[in-house]
Amino acid sequence: MAAADNANNLFFNTYKRLPLRPTRGEGVHIYTEDGREYLDLFAGVAVNALGHSHPRVVAAITDQARRYIHVSNYFQQEPQEHLAALLLRHSGMARVFLANSGAEVVEGALKIARLWGGPRGRREIVGFGGAFHGRTFGALSVMDRPGYRDGFGPFLDGCRSLPFNDVAALEAGVGPQTAAVILECIQGEGGVRPVSDAFAAALKDLRRRHGFLVIADEIQSGGFRTGPFLACEHWDLQPDLVTLAKPIGGGLPLGAILGAASVADVLQSGMHGTTFGGNPVACAAGVAVLEEIEEKGLATHAVAMGALLQSRLEEIAAAFPAQAREVRGRGLMMALELADDAAPVVEALRDRGILVNATERTVLRFVPPLVIGPEHIEQAAAALREVLGAR
Ligand SMILES: Cc1ncc(COP(=O)(O)O)c(C=O)c1O
């Protein structure tokens, strides 16, 4: 029985799975059951910052698993404290809440915004068109994407979505009723779309005038992927709340809400919690990731590799003007928007041993491990040229 058929008989039909069965991952490569090697420019959807099974992450996981795997949040746990201290140092924020996934920390951040806004008479939470914040009701409530929302309503009261990068709509849409605005400074699932400088400036100005909270969803863009620890630093946004997940658990499930001093005292004992959140093995893996990034200068490396990737994609876009629309992104969060459906290109690249993914139908998204080398980018660029040249 084919791999995909087997999976379809076991699970709810939620994922369109690739016809690949990995047996091993190492660095930027995945090896499959049929003996093939793939260059992974997808990194488990921007999770594997150090690539697959990095020895430092494996050692941290093994070591912590031998000590204790789970004790619950009734205990003081060194791996949690170590990770929290690193997250605060890198972000300049004041408090951390550790959870298990992206959607869960978005949910938690929205709850903090409601708690903060309630006594101030502010009930409205504003999201932006094209954003993706996860699959829970809170996250879906601040999104405008029919494909993710259809059939699941009604959603939370007091949530609305405004068009992204539309300054006039923002000015008209926020005010003293606004508790918080949630945004991805670089929309990931939405097609690697950065916030415009004008929109970021208007948001900062409106926040000064109206005093609402800003929540930066850095689940995909955070963790040094674009150079700074948080992508919102490119626009000096200084958010009140930050949501993080994907890379910070080294491939294990982990999410974090970071809060600035403005919200440090909003949550009181018993108001929020989770059984598994901040699992010590995941935290130990996250510490290994962040320390390796810092010690090896991988943030600077990500910027250099991002620049190389961007220039190769721009050359390719110039060479195939009928097929390519735009190259955009920052650091190692990069995209080539095609004029047409990206799926056949993704498939042809896969046949040549390169894994990328498509978002928004026409956008080829590149979110490789930060440890990627120039030779891998050249290999991917050569394959992409070949694929577009053959169309
Ligand atoms: C920006 C952003 N927010 C939230 C999420 C949801 O994270 P999770 O899938 O861990 O719930 C994602 C996942 O892709 C994301 O990219």
Image: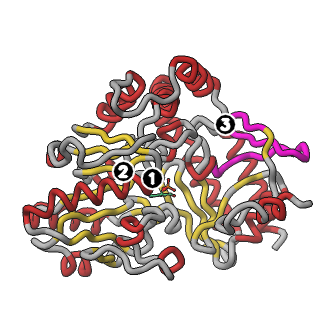
Q: Position of residue 143 (x, y in %)?
A: 40, 72
How dense is the environment of label 1, judged by Cα within 10 Å: few (below 14), some, or many (20 and up)?
Answer: many
Q: Which of 143 and 328 is in front in this view?
A: 143
Judge whether 262 appears above or below 334 on screen.
above
N-terminal of the pair, mark 1 or mark 3, is 3
N-terminal of the pair, mark 1 or mark 2, is 1
Label disc, if present, on residue 52 of the rendered structure: 3
Q: How is the image coloured?
A: secondary structure
> What residue range appears in magenta?
24-42
Which residue is painted at 90% across and 43% down in the image? 35
Label disc, if present, on residue 102 of the rendered structure: 1
Judge whether 26 appears above or below 265 on screen.
above
**SS at mark 2 in the image:** strand
Q: Is 41 included in the stretch rendered in magenta?
A: yes
> Is residue 97 visible in this depiction of the protein?
yes
Which residue is painted at 69% across and 39% down in the image? 28
Q: Is 67 included in the stretch rendered in magenta?
A: no
Q: Position of residue 391 (x, y in %)?
A: 81, 74
Q: Quadrant of residue 202?
A: bottom left
Image depth: mark 1 or mark 3 in front: 1
Residue identifier under label 2: 243
Horizontal placement of 318 versus 49: left or right? right
What is the C-alpha distance between the residues marked 1 and 3?
Answer: 20 Å
Horizontal placement of 159 versus 298: left or right? left
**SS at mark 1 in the image:** helix
> Is residue 293 visible in this depiction of the protein?
no
Q: Position of residue 64 (x, y in %)?
A: 53, 21
The residue type indicated by label 2 comes to Thr
Task: Report the quarter where the N terminus lies.
Answer: bottom right
Q: Do the residues labelled 1 and 2 touch (CB within 8 Å)?
A: yes
N-terminal of the pair, mark 2 or mark 3, is 3
